Image (tube, helix red, strand yellow):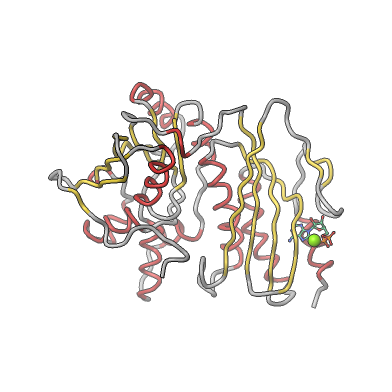
Amino acid sequence: MPSEFALIDAIARRAAARADVVLGIGDDAAILAMPEGRQLVVAMDTLNAGVHFPDDTAPADIGWKALAVNLSDLAAMGAQPAWCTLSLSLPDSDAGWVDGFLNGFLALAALHDVALVGGDTTRGPLSVCVTAHGFVAPDGALRRDGARVGDDVWVTGALGDAAAALVQWRRGGDRDPALRARLERPAPRVAAGVALAPLANAAIDVSDGLLADIGHVCAASGVGAQVELDALPTSPALAAAFDHVRRRALQCSGGDDYELCFTAARRHREALLAIVGNGDLEMTRIGRIVPGSGVVAFDGDGNPWQPPQRGFDHFAG
Ligand code: ADP
Ligand code: MG
C-alpha cells in the first residue's frame, strides 16, 4: 500500500498550475497571489459516504461532485473560481481509488480553470472536504440578503432531475441516464453566476430544495416570496418519468439541483434574457418577492400548495 506521502505525490503530479499560484502542493501551505482590486470569496462543503452519496458511487463521480458543490456555492455568490483545497479521509491508502477520484475532480477543475493548491490526507471513514476560492469585484458579490419587494424570482436550468434520479436509484430497476447524470455530475452554473452578479439583487444555489432555499433568501432579506408551480422549468427526462404531482414534490423539495435561484428587479428582465441568448443555459421566471415573510407556492388555479416534505436538514429528527 502506498504511504500518505506517495498518495500526496500522486495528487501533486496531476494538479494543474495557474499563474497566480506562487507555491502549490508540497510545502506547509500554499501561497496565492490575489488579483488587484478583487475580494476573495471562500466556500467549503463536505461529502460523506452513505450520507451525500451511496457507498458504491464511482470514485470519479464523487470527485466531480465534491468540487461541483463548492463551485456551485461560488457561482451563487457571483464569484469567478480560481483555487481549491482538498481534504481526503480514506479508509485505506488506495491509489486506484484516488486516481479515479482525481479523474472526476480534475476534469471539472480543468473546465473552470481551478487549481488544486493543497489539502490534507488522513485515514478514517470515507469523507471528502473541499474548499473553493474565487474572486468578485469589491462589494459585487450576490448575497442572500439583497432581495427586494417587487423583484422577480428566477431559476437557471431545470429543477427536480437529481431528486428524480435518487428516487429511481432507491426503487431499483431502470434508471434514466439523463436524470442520473444530473445527480452524479451536476454542472455548477459558474458563467451564469458571474454574468448575473451585476443585475441580480440576491442569489442562492438550490441544494436543499427550491422552496427551502428561497426561504433562506427571504429570511435573510426580510421579505416573502410567491412561486408559480406551473412555471417551474422541467426537463424532458423528468416529464417523461414522473407525473405532474410527483414531479412537483421533487422540484419543490428534492434538492441537489445545483441550479441558481436569484431575484432581480423587473427592469432587468430583458438584460437577463439576453444573457440566456449568449449561452445554452435557460433562465426562467418562477415568482416574485412580496412583503412579509415565508414562501408560498401556487398551483395553476391560484390555490396555495404545500409540498409533502420541505428541504433537507441533516439534523432533522
Ligand atoms: P503538513 O503535515 O505540513 O500539514 P502534509 O503532509 O499534510 O503537510 O501535506 C503536504 C503537502 O501536501 C501540503 O502542501 C498539502 O497542502 C498537500 N496535500 C496533502 N494532502 C493533499 C490532498 N489530498 N490534496 C492536495 N494536496 C494535499
Ligand atoms: Mg497536513
Which residue, as the protein is rendered here, is positioned at the far top?
267
Give the position of the C terminus as an image quadrant: bottom left
Q: Which corner quadrant of the figure contains ligand 1?
A: bottom right
Q: Is 220 left or right of 139, judged from the image as shown?
A: left
Q: Position of residue 97 (x, y in %)?
A: 67, 70
For the point 38% across and 54% down, which residue is it? 209
Q: Position of residue 221 (x, y in %)?
A: 41, 37
Q: Position of residue 176 (x, y in %)?
A: 37, 63
Is residue 19 at least partly visible in the picture? Answer: no
> In the rendered image, which quarter is residue 90 located in?
bottom right
> In the rendered image, which quarter is residue 302 located in?
top left
How many marks the image carries: the answer is 0
Q: Is 13 left or right of 227, judged from the image as shown?
A: right
> In the rendered image, which quarter is residue 214 located in?
top left
For the point 87% across and 53% down, which residue is it? 27
For the point 46% across and 58% down, which residue is it? 181
Q: Is residue 123 above or below residue 78?
A: below
Which residue, as the protein is rendered here, is positioned at the far left?
301
Q: Is residue 316 above or below residue 234?
A: below
Q: Is 296 left or right of 128, judged from the image as shown?
A: left
Q: Nearer the viewer, residue 168 or 81?
A: 81
Is residue 4 at least partly visible in the picture? Answer: yes
For the point 85% across and 55% down, which residue is it? 26
Q: Position of residue 71 (x, y in %)?
A: 57, 47
Q: Nearer the viewer, residue 307 or 126?
A: 307
Give the position of the N terminus as an image quadrant: bottom right
